[in-house]
Image: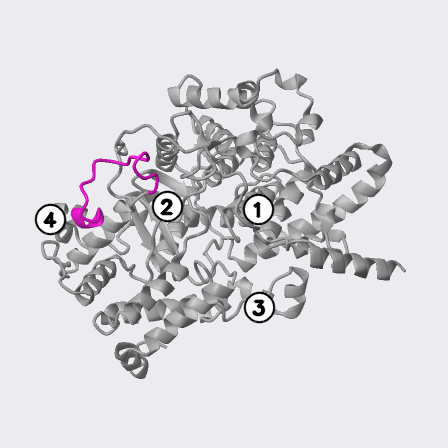
Amino acid sequence: ISLALYLYLFYAVDKYTLAVSDPGGPREHKIQRKPKWFDKNVVIENFNPNWRCVVAEDAHDVTENRFKEEKELTGNIALTGEPAGRQIWTNSNHVGTTGKTTEQQHNDIHEGIVQEMAAGGRRYKGFNPSINPNSADRIFRAQQIRDYLAAGNEPPKTNRWPKTPSEAAKKGAHFYSMLLTKDGHWAGDYGGPHFLLPGLVITWYIMGQPERMLDNEQCALIKHYIIVHQQADGGWGMHIESPSTMFGTTMMYVALRLLGVGIDNIVIQRSRAYIKYAGGAIMTASWAKFYLCLLGCMEWEGHNSVPPEMWMLPNWCPFHPGRMWCHARMVYLPMGYLYGSRFVYPQAESDPLIASLRQELYCTPYKTIPWMKTRHMVADTDNYSSIPLIMKIANNCLARYETWSIFQSFREWAREKGLKFSIDYMAAEDLQTNFINIGPVNKVLNMISAFHDADYNLDDHKVVKHMMRVPDYLWVAEDGMKMQGYNGSQAWDTSFAVQAFHESGLLDEFPQVSKSVYKYLERTQILSTHTSQSSPAFDYEGDAFRNKYYRHVSQGGWPFSTSAHGWPISDCTGEGLKGVMSLMECETVQKAIKAKEVI
């Protein structure tokens, strides 16, 4: 009878309800608010012109040398995984001579031509979010164009307009050939969300502000980025084109304060007024509340339960976390561990800045807030999709599970098992992704979890490996330093770009581009090279590990970003394969294959 009832319920839910991932139709009530910024042009003060993007093996060398020099570590701290596609930003203190042309070659270049082409022929007066809150990637483009010209190459003519579509396509291809990185991919700014960077800053602060994770110059660029994106109402949106929300504003406010911006700074004053007007930080979104709990600026009673023991349910259970979409699952994993451990920044009670934030973020004294009653509170600006009644009931039941003594013995027994599984699963995710992790949110939460599991030891092997991969998510543009929504979009962008070359009949017109991109796509196919197969990730391809950690086969797919990232994606695999097939049709690559210049 129980089985029959279960099957009937399963059939009814499947037939009459939307799939979990179904986005539904357009919203009945569109958001009427519009973002608004001050109309002013801003440039980065005292910007170090030696900042540059380095890729692949050069990027690995930079990271490994930085950690060896700054901490004098003697153990094996080499980065694992295929280096192709890795793109990080660094300054002259850590670059050495890697990938640089001579100073004289650069001095011979007309900088006006470089800047004109980097700006797409537009006159640049500074970053102005009221015109466009997206960067134009001028710094990166100028670097690539400068290096291209220093190597003795001719740029496309800027004083001649193409007369036919074919000429226009060829001129465009010529321009983009200048931007190709030395390992054969097209790099670029993949920023946008405003809740990512504060998560990193909070993690950095909790871990004792290690300079090898974020140094002073990086912190200055991060502060600049946050400040230039503040809107006229004092807030920040969930992303750069969003109207202000409590989620974005609370996270950015806390990040600025942790970075040393004073309580009386006008940016902070405007932001605090926005937060207080909305009812204080108790009205922010759940992920912001989670970070506040980690920092010690909110009590865990103010956050709904994230029980790690859910992993102990049988796999057939419809509520098992293994059934979640991979990004949701991999964020739930460290959240469950940190919630179950009731992790709080170790110096929270003695840190005067935390004491100050407890006053600044709320409209009533911190110690008088009835935290349990605030769990479902959220500002109207952030309430995109209201929590259904059944979810509120479920959360209330879990709240009783967390607090009632009748459940204590079972909870402690199950939680211990859940925590043990969670830290083991995170260790597997770290190795499968070479400590990049699936995305920026679980990246920083996994890092805090590793820090906690290592008894707060910054020199622990896993913690060091995590910090070495932080640069993979950072990008520098004319609006400062940001955290990207992934460790880049390298394979995705490059696959489409080379298909455009192919469909325009231009692959053989740009032979160096064709060969370089082919080599890059071959190296980026996941676990397809000797280097990638020598990494710990390859050990997880067996059925036992894939079933245990809810992973599909990785080998042979293409990622959104890099091979080292390790997560294959169906559409990225399709586009990567199309890119390779397009290249194999061109005479340049066919000859290179016969000559064994490429595989």
The alpha-carbon separation of the residues under discs 1 and 3 comes to 23 Å
Which amino acid, by three-letter code, is at mark 3? Val
Residue 498, quarter of picture: bottom left
Residue 288, position in %: x, y? 56, 34
Residue 313, position in %: x, y? 76, 53
Q: Earlier in the sequence, mark 2 or mark 4?
A: 4
The alpha-carbon separation of the residues under discs 4 and 3 comes to 50 Å
What's drawn in magenta, residue-wise? Answer: 116-134
Q: Earlier in the sequence, mark 1 or mark 3?
A: 1
Q: Which mark is residue 572?
A: none
Could you say which is closer to the camera, residue 383 or residue 530?
Answer: 383
Q: Which mark is residue 475?
A: 2
Q: Say above or below: 72 vs 44.
A: below
Tell me the mark number nearer the camera, choosing from 1 and 4.
4
Q: Earlier in the sequence, mark 1 or mark 4?
A: 4
In the rendered image, which residue does mark 3 sit on?
A: 553
In the rendered image, which residue does mark 4 sit on?
A: 110
Residue 39, quarter of picture: top left
**Callouts 1 and 2 close, C-beta under 8 Å:** no
Q: Earlier in the sequence, mark 1 or mark 2?
A: 1
Q: Is residue 66 left or right of residue 361?
A: left
The alpha-carbon separation of the residues under discs 1 and 4 comes to 46 Å
Residue 158, position in %: x, y? 12, 54
Q: Is residue 261 left or right of residue 362?
A: left
Query: Which secondary structure lies at badge 2?
Result: strand
Q: Which mark is residue 446?
A: 1
The alpha-carbon separation of the residues under discs 3 and 2 comes to 30 Å
Which amino acid, by three-letter code, is at mark 4? His
Residue 536 included in the magenta stretch of the image: no
> Is residue 445 visible in the rendered structure shown here?
yes
Could you say which is closer to the camera, residue 508 or residue 104?
Answer: 508
